[in-house]
Image (cartoon, coloured by chain):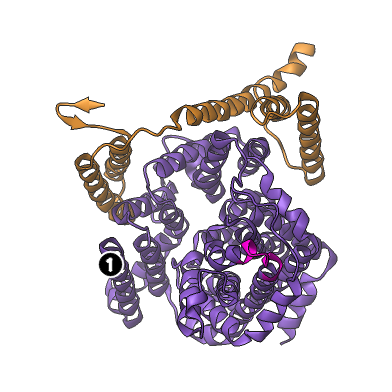
Amino acid sequence: MSRGGLRIGGAVLAAVAMAAIFAYALFEISRLSARSQLFPLATALPGLVVALAVVVRELRQPPRPISAEGATTRRAAAQFAAYFVGVFVAGFVATTAVFTAVYLWREAELPWPIALVAALAGVVTVLVFANTLHVPLPEGLIAPLLPRIGG
Amino acid sequence: MDIFIGSLVTVLQPATFALLALGVAIGFVVGILPGLGGAVTLALLLPFVYDMDPIPAFAFLLGMHAVVATTGDITSVLFGIPGEATTVATILDGHPMAKRGEAGRALGAVLSSSLFGAIVGAFALALSVPIIRPVILQFQPPEFLMLGVVGLSFVVALSGGNLLKGFAMALLGFLLAQVGLDPYAGLPRFVFGQLYLWDGINVVLVVLGMFAVPETLQLMSTRGAIARQIDPTAKLGGVLDGVRDTMKYWWLTLRCSLIGVFIGFIPGMGGATAQFIAYAHAQQSSKHPEEFGKGSIEGVLAAGSVNNSKEGGSIIPTVAFGVPGSTSMAILLGAFLIVGLVPGPAMLTTHLDVTFAMVWIIVVANILAVAGSFLLLRQLARLTFVRGAILAPFLLVLITIGAYTVHNNPLDIVVMLAFGLVGWAAVRWDWPRAPMLLAFVLGDLSERNLFLSNQLYGWSWLGRPLVLALLALAVLAVIYSIRRRDLRSAA
């Protein structure tokens, strides 16, 4: 991205985001009592100064070359996001079973029967572990609705 | 002495020993797999110790962590691929030995010297207890506050070429540690109106997000085999010759182990630094320095002995002062809080049994790992063929369960993912993560001690001799690191 002769890349935006966090903290601190401000102020004020120094330094540096692995990273990020959206919507068990099977088949290029067996074995292991140690698993939005639909 | 022996008996009790063996088994695999770090795995395993007593919890976590460097040496020797960042120096002479058909001897040497180093490190931890105990009892809140500053200064100063970013990340860590109720007035701050945040942000979510998420994304994007340069023809004979080498060069192995203890004791120095310093010392003191880098057994022994002895050393400041010497120790510090222990004087008095148990856990874990390594050397080599695409779904499962079990609240996963984004950005744009994590862990402790110091002494605590000495140490650490960085840049 280029603005008025300045080259603003992700590195600069990351530094600006850091400065914004400290600036917001300073705004929040102003609502606290004088004694309560001590530690947050000692953190946020130098934090803002250092973050702004990083912004200036990043602006002076030449733009970094765009990574050739950008497409694969985006693909991995999309798969990662899809898994967690699935966990929130369909729940952990269903999402893990489907995602693992499909991922092992498509990305790891395992034969689909092996991918399916590996996914089911993984889910069964997790369920045994969860039931034995009473570890709760995310249910998702759909599972709690099912009894209501049925009853 | 009774407590020392009693701690061994506790560690060897069936339930604790089973957890230790499980931890060792996990650490064993993690050490061999180049894509997985000991710190990341500690973060993944941290949620599983919530309902455990301290000693079984440490048997599981420390048992895993204590053997990661031991088995990490295996891939360093066989394939020239470090299983861990702390096993890089092992490649320098271990891999040339493997290439000339002495892989077995190199592995025998590196594994037996690792065990030797682990024992030296563990007993250094045990022996330091009576020395440190009277010293630490003199420490008051101002001194503990300054110890936090010292610990932080080492890590921030050792942020590589990113000193400014290291400071920024450390300050961000401090800021995040302040989310929740203000200890002065008991009022919420930085909570965005969310009741969920009144309790503060859990360290597990920060660690999973900052470390495990970016590593998993990395594995998912590479997809191919983790170990790409594999030479499966490496021979595995002559293991016992390597063990004999450790005994033959026992004085060198002991010296390098002690270097590891010393460097481990200094917060922020790191395992890789320890390995290279010991390696350099071995080369300087060798009668055949010209053989180093071409397959010198002395180089292998130096690198092998140091990477485990530093574990005992790095636990000393973590246990005694609550100052973690490394990222892994910062995560382990989180484990202390989870099982209800506060590092500091109590670990050398009330909870001395736990401290001694940690000594035995390191020793027993390494004996198990080295014995397992000798039995499974050939089969272990095959694990390096495991591809990132096969590991990724199973890591996602661990991350999700790890985050959700913190409060059994979907918001745990949201917070973890938010930190995952921060962690990914930190990796992408070279913001060092370790200073932030350490500051996050030390933040609450520092604020509490600042509050207590002011309550007890007003501002006069700033003139206490030990406070001034520690402040000077922190300043010196920063200056030293800046100078070292400048020298490195000039070179």
Q: Is residue B148 visible?
A: yes
In magenta segment, residue B101 = yes
Q: Is residue A63 above or below residue A150?
A: below
Q: Is residue B372 left or right of residue B315?
A: right
Question: In the image shown, does B468 or B476 lie closer to the viewer?
Answer: B476
Image: B417 above or below B60: above
* Residue span colored magenta: B97-105
Instruction: Report whether residue B408 is seen.
Output: no
The C terminus of chain B lies in quadrant:
bottom left
* Residue A45 in picture, x, y percent from top left: 25, 50
**Which residue corresponds to the image point at 34% horizontal and 68% vertical from the top-left?**
B454
Residue at 68% from the left image edge and 43% from the top image edge: B386
Left or right: where does residue A131 sit relative to residue B442?
A: right
Q: Secondary structure at mark 1?
A: helix
Closer to the camera, B436 or B351?
A: B436
* Residue at the (22%, 32%) spot, across then down: A7
| Left or right of B171, for residue B247 | right
Write down which chain is painted purple. Answer: B
- Residue ID for mark 1: B487
Q: At 78% across and 72% down in the image, what residue appears? A: B10
Q: Is residue A51 left or right of residue B46?
A: left
Amino acid type indicated by mark 1: Leu
Q: Which chain is orange?
A: A
Chain that bears disc 1: B
Q: Residue furthest front?
A: B100
Q: Position of residue B272 (x, y in %)?
A: 49, 65
